[in-house]
Amino acid sequence: MFWDKETETLERSALEALQLQRLQATVRRVARKVPLYQQRFAEAGLKPGHIRSLADVRRLPFTTSADLRATYPTGMVAVAAGELLRLHTSSGTTGKPKALFFSRTDVDNAAGLMARCLTMSGITRRDVLQNMMTYGLFTGALVMHYGAEKVGCLVIPAGPGNSERQLLLMQDFRTTAVHVTPSYALYFADFLEKHGIDPRKDLALRKAFVGAEPYTEETRCKIEQALGIDVYNSYGLSEMNGPGVAFECVHKNGMHLWEDNFLLEIIDPQTGAPLPDGQPGELVLTTLCREAMPLLRYRTRDITSVIPGRCRCGRTHRRLHRITGRSDDMLILRGVNIYPQQIERVLMSLPQVGRNYLIELEGLDEMIIKVELAKAGFDGQVGHLVQLQAQISDRLRMELLVKPKVELVAPGSLPVSEGKAKRVIDHRTL
Ligand code: AMP
Ligand code: ZN
C-alpha cells in the first residue's frame, strides 16, 4: 500500500532531478538567512551558484550538534518569527539542548512522511494506534501522532509507562498497533506475562513501530515472539523532524529513507570521505524541504550503510541497514573499540537471557555486564547458573575480543527507563 505512490516510486533520474532542484533552493535559502552558513560559505569562497550537481553537496560545510548548541536558541532559524509554528528540543546528555523549529509546512511535511511510513507497513484508517512514546518537547510522540491522524487511525496518546493503564487501553479500545521504544516493548511483554495475558488471544495487537534507540535483530525477534506481532524498525532524529525519516516496508529488509526530503550520504566518520553503497559509515543528512530550520550535511553520528539494490515493494527510495551504533557510543576498553549493540546481539540470541541488561565500566578499565535471566530459563540449580555465566562470557570474548565480567541477576531487577534506555554507565577513573 502506498500513501503517495508517485513520489515513492519515482524513477531514480526523476528523483535525483528533484533532489538537485530542492538542494539548490535550500542552499539559496540558508545563504540568505542563516548567519552560520553565511560565514562558512564566505570562509570557503562558496556561492549558491556553485552547486550544479548532487555531487557538489560535498563542497558544502558539515553541520554538527555542536553548531546547533552554539547557535541556541534561534541562530539557525531561516524564517520570520511569525512563521514559526512549533518548537521541539533534543535532550542530549550534557550542556545546552538543541532547539528545533517547524513552520506550518514543516509540520505538514513531517506528518505526510509519517503517513507514508505507516501506510507502507499496512496501517489504514481502521487501525487503532497506541502511541507509547513520551509526549512533550521530544519529537517522537507528536510527529507520529500527527502522521497517524493524517492516515485516519484512531490515535491513543498514551505516552510511556503505567503498564496497567496501557493494558486497559489496549483491551478496551482494541489497539492494533503501538509505537514504542525497544526497551519498553520488552518490559511490557514481561508485564503481560506476569499478569497472565496472552497477547495472541487476549489482544488485537498486530504491529509495533519500534525505534528512538538502537536495537538488534535479535531484540526484534524477542519482541515479535513475546507479543506475537510484526515489529517494524522506525528511524528518525529530532534534527530531521523526528520519526518518519526512514522506515521499514512489509518486507522488513532495511528502512526506506525518504530521499525526496533528505539527501543522504554515508561518510567515513574519521576522514569525512564519502563511502559507496554497502559500506558502513556515518549517516549524513541534508534537509531538502525544511523551511524553518534547513540543515546542510548534518552529522547524525549514526553508523549504518545503504543496502544496494531495489526493494521488492517497488519503492525507489534507498534502504538503510539497521543502525549498528552511534560513533559517539563507541566504548574503548583496553584499546579495543566496542559498540553496545555487539553485546546486545550476543545476549539476546540466548534463550536463557531475559529482556534487560546493563553495561558498567569501572576502575581502570573493567567491564561488568549485568544480565537479567529469563523467567523460564533457570531451573534453580547453581551449577547451571555458573555454566551459563561462563557461556555468556566466552561468547562475548569471541565477539568483543576482551572478556567482560558477567553477573546474572533476577528477572525484572534492572532499572527500566520510560524514555530512551540507558545501557551504559561509565564509572571509570581514567
Ligand atoms: P532524538 O533526536 O532524541 O529523537 O534521537 C535520535 C537518535 O536516536 C538517532 O540519532 C539515533 O541515534 C537514535 N535512533 C532513533 N531511531 C532509531 C532506530 N530505529 N534505530 C537505532 N537508533 C535510533
Ligand atoms: Zn520496500
Image (cartoon, rainbow, N blue to C red):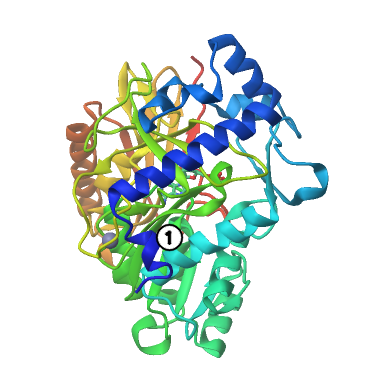
Above or below residue 28? Residue 271 is above
Q: Position of residue 175 (x, y in %)?
A: 49, 82
Disc 1 Cβ-to-ligand 1 distance below 8 Å: yes
Residue drawn where x is 52% and y is 82% of the image: 170
**Nearer to me, 355 or 329:** 329
User: SS of the residue at dot 1?
Assistant: strand
Identified at 37% across, 64% down, the residue is 6
Residue nearest the viewer, comparing 109 with 345: 109
Q: In this view, does 250 lie to the left or right of 164?
A: left
Query: Badge 1 local density, few (<14 within 10 Å), some, or many (20+)?
Result: many
Residue 323 screen position, x and y as percent: 35, 43
- Residue 213 visible at all: yes
| Tag 1: amino acid | Val
Residue at 40%, 48% (x, y): give it: 259
| Number of residue marks | 1
Dot 1 corresponds to which residue? 210
